[in-house]
């Protein structure tokens, strides 16, 4: 292979395959566009949920709620992950990308799919929310858009595996696969299983929407949909944890203390995470109680164990690295002297804390059969997953971006100051919002509800005033997070286009 296809990064010494670099750039740019659209929708939805503001009419509330969830949870996160896979498969391995043209094909399919989905949703053809449970039916183009996006993703994941095979054959790295790439590989394995479930549910639903299938059984839909919907969150967890290791190394020079243990933990995700999908069916009458309790009270914890291992491993390796730098006075000097002003470090630590304490603990409790029944469909659930995918995954990805811009786009971040405070604003905002949503949910405030004052209805109902207080707090936390999110988008886009060339 021609070495003209490579450049060497002057700061890290890593070899960057230029065609891979182009694809990483393209995927990252679309990710940031998606978080921008998703963020605008978030603002509108958030303000509508506050009874005192209530800006959107009912139909636009559900429309933008659908757009928010899809653009954030699917488009933003998956484009960023694909960029991450190309990065982990090439740059971290000093390797070339197996087939860049295939990467562009995947990219085009994903962009076209995401474009169709957004267009149909905004035109009012798919007010079905993220889960699109039948008998709610969207315009056929909606399902088609999702299928195109999923096919593109599957191709991109295949390209990542092809690249791993090439790197191995061409011996571009010594020893076993680096930990971060190993973690990404586990995410990619889960992605394949997830996308196959996605095909198994979206293709029949598409056929139903064009009239070729008479009906879709709602229970069957929920079972298979969550075989897709839940593991896709585990791709996010796996990728997020890989990013934690990467950021810990980039910001403090830390190395895993026991790589075998960390790798085993990643494997636990691959083996057991699908079991947890069942927490979405806990209130359904289809499965037996004994089965539910066995599954979510015992087996699920094998996947939780994995997160616990990582949650100790990452701070531990950071502590050891900082102590080696001389911050070894007492128990906590290392923590005090840690690089809290580095956005990569603060994002990693905040992501770890919010994911663990806000998202993780509540996921484990709400996901048991006994508690699920009292939290189901309340705002507490929305609070839980903003702790995982927003405070956890999204924040970690934001932190990584501050390194991707100089390394891959070769531009300086235009405002280092903004980059420093942004993770705190976003993290603290999400922390307040997610916790407040959970408290509000514990008073029975429903999720996905346009008007909890029930104005003008035949059966009015008033929630406990304390619940209203928590709703207001959720609003304030959400606004803080939106400010943090806007700073991220502005700083990233500004740097990519106008940052000083490196
Ligand atoms: C600035 C940050 C954000 C704010 C203020 C925010 C706010 C909200 C609000 C108010 C809802 C509506 C809840 C309801 O009515 O039940 C919501 C739903 C949702 N959000 Fe966010 N969000 C943010 C970021 C994100 C991100 C980054 C993701 C994904 C990575 C995400 C994923 C979701 C999902 C999946 C739903 C559920 C939609 C549904 O129930 O159908 N959000 N968000
Ligand atoms: Cu789930």
Image (tube, rainbow, N blue to C red):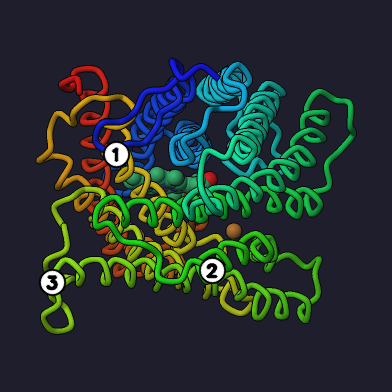
- Earlier residue among tags 1 and 2: 1
Between 432 and 57, the residue placed more toward the observer is 432
Taking the image as shown, residue 198 lies to the left or right of residue 12, namely: right
Q: Which residue is mark 3?
A: 327
| The image quadrant in which ligand 2 is located | bottom right
Left or right: 38 as drawn, with respect to 229? left
Could you say where residue 14 lies in the image, as x and y percent from the top left?
36, 36
> Image check: 158 left or right of 404?
right
Q: Quadrant of residue 311?
A: bottom left
* Residue 435, percent from left and from top: 34, 65
Q: Is residue 414 left or right of residue 8?
A: left
Q: Disc 1 designates what residue?
A: 12
> What residue do we see at 23% from left, 25% from top?
411
Q: Residue at x 38, y 40 (%)?
A: 45
Vertical side of 65 occupied by 475: above or below: below
Rendered-image quadrant of the N terminus: top right
Query: Would residue 329 be seen by someone viewing this image from the given angle?
Result: yes
Q: Is residue 448 above or below residue 82?
A: below
Q: Secondary structure at mark 1?
A: loop
Give the number of marks: 3
Find out whether the residues at labels 1 and 2 contact each other: C-beta distance under 8 Å.
no
Q: Mark 1 packing: few (<14 Cα in 10 Å), some, or many (20+)?
A: few
The reply to whether residue 449 is in sight is no
């Amino acid at each position: 292979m021609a070495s003209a296809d490579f450049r060497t990064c002057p700061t890290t010494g890593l070899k960057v395959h230029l065609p891979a670099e182009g694809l990483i750039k393209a995927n990252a740019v679309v990710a940031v566009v998606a978080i921008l659209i998703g963020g605008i929708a978030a603002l509108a939805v958030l303000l509508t949920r506050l009874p005192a503001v209530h800006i959107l009419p009912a139909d636009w509330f559900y429309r933008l709620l659908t757009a928010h969830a899809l653009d954030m949870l699917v488009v933003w996160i998956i484009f960023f992950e694909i960029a991450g896979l190309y990065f982990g498969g090439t740059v971290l391995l000093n390797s070339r990308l197996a087939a860049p043209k295939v990467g562009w094909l995947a990219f085009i399919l994903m962009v076209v799919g995401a474009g169709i989905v957004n267009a149909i949703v905004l035109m009012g053809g798919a007010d079905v929310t993220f889960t699109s449970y039948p008998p709610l039916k969207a315009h056929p183009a909606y399902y088609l858009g999702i299928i195109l996006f999923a096919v593109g993703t599957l191709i991109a994941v295949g390209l990542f595996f092809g690249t791993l095979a090439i790197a191995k054959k061409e011996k571009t790295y010594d020893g076993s696969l680096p930990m971060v790439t190993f973690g990404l590989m586990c995410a990619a394995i889960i992605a394949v299983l997830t996308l196959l479930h996605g095909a198994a549910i979206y293709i029949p639903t598409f056929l139903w929407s064009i009239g070729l299938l008479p009906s879709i059984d709602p229970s069957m839909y929920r079972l298979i949909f969550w075989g897709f919907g839940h593991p896709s969150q585990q791709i996010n967890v796996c990728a997020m944890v890989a990013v934690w290791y990467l950021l810990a190394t980039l910001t403090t020079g830390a190395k895993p203390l026991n790589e075998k243990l960390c790798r085993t933990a990643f494997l636990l995700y691959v083996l057991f995470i699908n079991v947890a999908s069942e927490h979405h069916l806990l209130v359904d009458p289809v499965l037996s109680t004994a089965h539910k309790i066995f599954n979510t009270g015992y087996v699920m914890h094998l996947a939780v164990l994995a997160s616990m291992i990582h949650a100790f491993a990452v701070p531990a390796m950071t502590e050891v690295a900082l102590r080696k730098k001389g911050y070894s006075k007492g128990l906590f000097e290392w923590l005090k002297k840690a690089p809290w002003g580095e956005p990569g470090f603060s994002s990693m630590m905040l992501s770890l804390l919010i994911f663990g304490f806000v998202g993780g603990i509540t996921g484990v409790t709400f996901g048991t059969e006994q508690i699920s029944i009292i939290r189901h469909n309340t705002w507490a659930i929305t609070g839980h997953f903003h702790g995982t995918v927003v405070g956890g995954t999204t924040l970690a990805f934001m932190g990584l971006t501050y390194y991707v811009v100089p390394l891959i786009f070769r531009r300086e971040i235009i405002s280092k100051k903004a980059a420093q405070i942004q993770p705190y604003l976003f993290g603290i905002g999400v922390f307040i919002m997610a916790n407040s949503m959970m408290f509000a949910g514990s008073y029975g405030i429903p999720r996905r509800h346009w008007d909890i004052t029930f104005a003008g209805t035949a059966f009015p109902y008033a929630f406990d005033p304390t619940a209203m207080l928590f709703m207001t707090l959720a609003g304030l936390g959400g606004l803080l997070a939106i400010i943090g999110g806007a700073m991220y988008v502005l700083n990233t886009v500004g740097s990519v286009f106008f940052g000083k060339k490196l």
